[in-house]
Image (cartoon, rainbow, N blue to C red):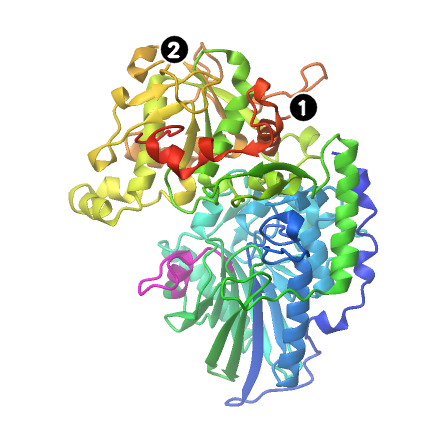
Amino acid sequence: MRKHVLSYVLSFVFLLAMSACSPSDNNGTLTLKEGETVKFTLLQTTDVHHHVVGTGPSATYGTENDATKGGYARLARRIQYIKGEQAAAGSPTVLVDSGDFLMGTVYDLSLGSNPAALAFFKTIGYSAITIGNHELDYGPTPLANFFNLPLVNGLPSVFKVPVVVSNMQTNGHTGINALKTAGVFKESHIITLDNGLKVGLLGFMGANAAADAPVKAPVTFDNDLTDPDVVEAFQAKVDAIREAGAHVVVVLSHSGITDPNSDDPGGDDVELATAVEGIDIIASGHEHQMTADVVTVNGTRIICAGRYGESLAQLNATVKIGTGVIQASYTNNCIGNCDDGDDYFEENQAIKVKLVGGLDTAINASLEASGLPDVNEIVAGTNSSNLAIPNQPGETGIGNLAADSLRYLLAGAGGNPSMSIVANGVIRNGYTLGQQVSFADIYNTLPLGMTLDPANQNIPGYPLVMIYMDNTSILNLCKLAAYTIGAQDGAFMAYLLANSPTMYMALSNLKPDYYLNFSGVRYTYGAGYAVTADNVALYGATDFSCQSAPTIPSISLLGTNRIPCVLDLYTALMFLDADMQSLLTVAGLPIVPYTGVTGSTVLSADNVLNSRLDRDTSTAGVQEVKEWMALLQFVTKPTAQAGLNNMIADSKYGSTALGSGNASRVNP
């Protein structure tokens, strides 16, 4: 993709006059006394993932059939309205984001010039943000470059929104250290509001989130809340910001809360609130689970807006000086087409026309220059209602579709068996019955990541790699997938806790996002989610529906042979991650990916780029195949070339097909 095509479009965005959206921050002329009460409003977004025009069919946005939720222009208008409303009530506003603002849509194509999310934060006037694990999908050097794009002579002349990250260790990384020196990245930040209230802001990256950033090195995060030294260190930061004058302490946490609307919420943010005293509010991110109401743990109020800009979290708080928050009311402001019928479509026209419109113009020019469809050009249709985003482990239509698209690249292997793997966590978009699917919708389905190769970083997306698996690794992959289903089964996990605590601890780390979708493999699990070699079959490279007789009916017949397997770089690196290797060892599931069909070279972080697929072998170097490219190709190629011919069919990916065994990969 041509970076320079995008470079011009955002240069004027920062000239927008949006005084109603600027942060409330004075020079501390008001002095509040012990026992006084004042109000403030905390607004939070999190895990927006570059959903510039929200979620849902992109081509319907702004039409009479609009089924989308979220979107920058709608968020901006709602923020603007609430700020005005609360100011009139004597409650100034603090606007924050809890991370994962990048990675997730076609608007990642703005990363080469001026990331859309950073333009939005600056233009709207966010008070502070923190980073999430997906900001580190590219590694720390590209992340530093994103923030350097709006810097001039090393000074934050354009991007002045504080990035608060309090538990990060840079370990000498030059780019991140430079951002700290420039005052862009900060360990803490205090805002003094118009009513004299001093709001102290800290940032925290949780253990689960950091584990989902396999290329973050050398950057690390002190987040093991079972370690007294880690707890003591963060407690000292909370105490220090209070000693510096903060009346209330807010942690922007990319850690997560799970089951927030149950009687027993969990997650890293619950652990943080339990372990550290004196945090008034945690604005939580990472798990994508919206809090229906405030979750109070150890005197700390936890809120979360959910994901994708579909909701704007609003906490109206009363603070007693010397005591902290004494009263709070909470609202989730639904943005766009809302399930409760209370739709909010009103837009900020400056954001819509200048920012979003400018992005569309530039991205379309870049796409056209590369021979790709425009953002909202329709490339396919669906006649299936079974293509929603997977939110639980198990076989799904969209999971099979994604896996098939990767294996499609090996169709030239003829009748020989081959396989592909797509983890649930990288599938970020689904489709509805009868949807007209645009290029953006396809891209947004498998949009994540960035290569480690600077020569290919002008096009976002995880590159695809081809590795080789023997029968032991294939069997253990199927066991891992089955155990990921079992990890959500309360009765099964209770049995393990009583009879195999070590196995219980290992499997309790298997989140639904880790579920592996396969193509070319069919497996059956029995009692206790057990999988045996005789219950794993392999199919030919072009047999996507597993309808023909298996090429290898039992992987025990594979012998010492290996078969090719296509997967994205992220999944490959996760298999190599030390924590994942430890989990696999404890669970008795060794997985050893090789770099060749023969030989003893095992895949490693040092050689993984040598295994990338090359879409143009006639050109020097590797022209990477990004994951979204594989899906686009599979969906649009004609039937004669084993593609889907622009129709994602219910006969292949519908619930009936999967349930009857036709096209099924699990327990047919």
Closer to us: 161 or 456? 456
Residue drawn at (45%, 41%) of the image: 386
x then y, percent, for residue 287: 46, 53
Q: Residue furthest left?
A: 499
Residue 418, picture quadrant: top left
Closer to us: 328 or 644? 644
Compared across the picture, whether 516 is left or right of 79 comes to left
**Disc with the residue nearer the chain's start (2 vs 1):** 2
Residue 265 located within the stretch drawn in magenta: yes
As displayed, is residue 306 above or below residue 34? above
x then y, percent, for residue 58: 64, 48
Amino acid type at mark 1: Gln
Image disc number at residue 623: 1
Compared across the picture, whether 252 is left or right of 155 comes to left
Residue 157 located within the stretch drawn in magenta: no
x then y, percent, for residue 319: 51, 82
Amino acid type at mark 2: Asn
Q: Secondary structure at mark 2?
A: loop
Report if residue 606 is visible in the image.
no
- Density class for disc 2 (Cα within 10 Å; few <14, some 14-19, many ≥20) is few
Residue drawn at (52%, 39%) of the image: 383
Closer to us: 51 or 60? 60
Image disc number at residue 561: 2
What are the residue bounds of the magenta stretch? 253-273
Cα distance, mark 2 to mark 1? Answer: 29 Å
As displayed, is residue 410 above or below residue 507? above
Q: Quadrant of the C terminus?
A: top left
Q: Secondary structure at mark 1?
A: loop
Compared across the picture, whether 568 is left or right of 302 comes to right
Secondary structure that dominates the magenta span: loop
- Density class for disc 1 (Cα within 10 Å; few <14, some 14-19, many ≥20) is some
